[in-house]
């Protein structure tokens, strides 16, 4: 039996979900516009105060930390480097790995793919100590490379790209070979344009994953110069005005990326990249 739902009811359900999902953000933004004493005395606010610009400006430009060099701008930059570097490296590596496993007809492609999938069953915490030791031995401690490089291998990204490549008709590969396209030309002129939606999907997911990383940057860095926004929240306190400013700042770039890539994301996630 099919349940008939009116457009008004569907829109009401969607609006209710939007309000519930965005209520914490709204509370944070409203509270930022009040003084710290108001927050400590009355808690989160749903009314607009008059100190929003002052509070945000103070957090963006004032220096803090033991070295006196931490600002919200520096933490924002570190988060962007971590997120963008992680997304670019992971997307590129996964794309090439899936391409090799799908089109090079390797005899060991099956076992290699099985090993990759097995890594999905191992949580990051189980790999922390050996990964940390390798990174330190390579001189990657307190570097952006050390934050990004050890995490770029992603089995789920390889799986997603491989599944898309397997859905590409063999006739396209045969036509490219007849036209004289080699592996590199087939990759750059055929697969990359066809995979734009999938690339955008993986890039966005990995950017958000890298942006929200807390445990690994905490372990691989001790210099305040490399503090990210997520780490800064624990440093300044998540229940203070400064912490709420960092929460809003930490949310804006990933949200903007999702909004900008929403059409590609919908196609990549639900239409198989076509």
Image (cartoon, grey):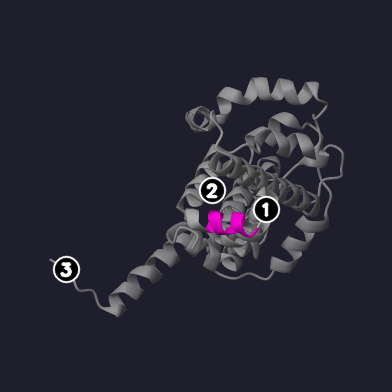
Question: What element does badge 1 sit on?
Answer: helix
Q: Which residue is mark 1?
A: 246
Do the residues bearing badges 1 and 2 touch, measured as CB atoms within 8 Å? Answer: no
**Could you say which quadrant of the image residue 214 lies in?**
top right
Mark 3 closeness class: few <14, some 14–19, many ≥20 residues within 10 Å: few
In the displayed structure image, the side of residue 143 where residue 28 appears, left or right: left
Query: Reading the chain from its start, which is encountered first: label 3 or label 1?
Result: 3
Tally of numbered tags: 3
Percent of width and height locating residue 15: 40, 71
| Distance between mark 3 and mark 1 Cα atoms | 46 Å
Q: Nearer the viewer, mark 3 or mark 2?
A: 2
User: Would you say residue 261 sits in the magenta stretch?
Assistant: no
Q: Say which residue appears at 64% left-offset and 53% top-offset.
A: 187
**Tag on residue 161?**
2
Seen from the viewer's position, the closer of residues 211 and 25 is 211
Do the residues bearing badges 3 and 2 touch, measured as CB atoms within 8 Å? Answer: no
Percent of width and height locating residue 249: 67, 57
**Could you say which quadrant of the image residue 73 lies in?**
bottom right
**Tag on residue 2?**
3
Image: magenta residue range: 172-179
Q: Say which residue appears at 78% left-offset and 31% top-offset.
A: 222
Question: What element does badge 2 sit on?
Answer: helix
Q: Nearer the viewer, mark 3 or mark 1?
A: 3
Examine the rendered structure and indicate whether residue 16 appears above or below residue 135: below
Percent of width and height locating residue 168: 49, 55
Query: Reading the chain from its start, which is encountered first: label 1 or label 2?
Result: 2
Q: Is residue 32 visible?
A: yes
Examine the rendered structure and indicate whether residue 62 appears above or below residue 2: above
Image quadrant for the N terminus? bottom left
Q: Say which residue appears at 66% left-offset and 55% top-offset.
A: 181
Q: Say which residue appears at 50% left-offset and 42% top-offset.
A: 159
| Distance between mark 1 and mark 2 Cα atoms | 34 Å
């Amino acid at each position: 039996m099919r349940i008939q739902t009116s457009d008004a009811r569907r829109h009401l359900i969607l609006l209710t979900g939007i309000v519930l999902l965005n209520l914490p953000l709204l509370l944070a933004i409203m509270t930022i516009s009040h003084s710290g004493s108001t927050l400590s005395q009355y808690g989160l606010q749903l009314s607009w105060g008059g100190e929003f610009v002052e509070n945000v400006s103070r957090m963006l430009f004032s220096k803090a930390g033991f070295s006196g060099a931490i600002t919200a701008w520096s933490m924002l930059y570190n988060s962007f480097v971590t997120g963008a570097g992680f997304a670019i490296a992971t997307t590129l590596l996964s794309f090439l790995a899936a391409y090799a496993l799908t089109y090079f007809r390797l005899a060991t492609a099956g076992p290699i793919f099985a090993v990759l999938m097995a890594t999905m069953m191992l949580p990051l915490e189980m790999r922390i100590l050996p990964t940390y030791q390798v990174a330190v031995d390579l001189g990657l401690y307190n570097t952006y490379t050390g934050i990004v490089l050890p995490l770029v291998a992603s089995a789920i990204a390889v799986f997603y790209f491989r599944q898309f490549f397997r859905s590409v008709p063999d006739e396209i590969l045969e036509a490219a070979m007849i036209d004289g396209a080699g592996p590199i030309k087939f990759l750059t002129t055929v697969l990359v344009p066809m995979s734009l939606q999938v690339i955008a999907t993986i890039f966005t997911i990995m950017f958000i994953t890298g942006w929200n990383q807390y445990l690994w940057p905490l372990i691989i860095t001790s210099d305040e110069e490399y503090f990210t926004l997520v780490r800064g929240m624990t440093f300044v306190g998540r229940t203070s005005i400064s912490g709420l400013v960092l929460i809003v700042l930490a949310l804006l770039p990933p949200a903007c990326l999702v909004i900008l890539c929403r059409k590609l994301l919908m196609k990549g996630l639900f239409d198989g990249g076509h």
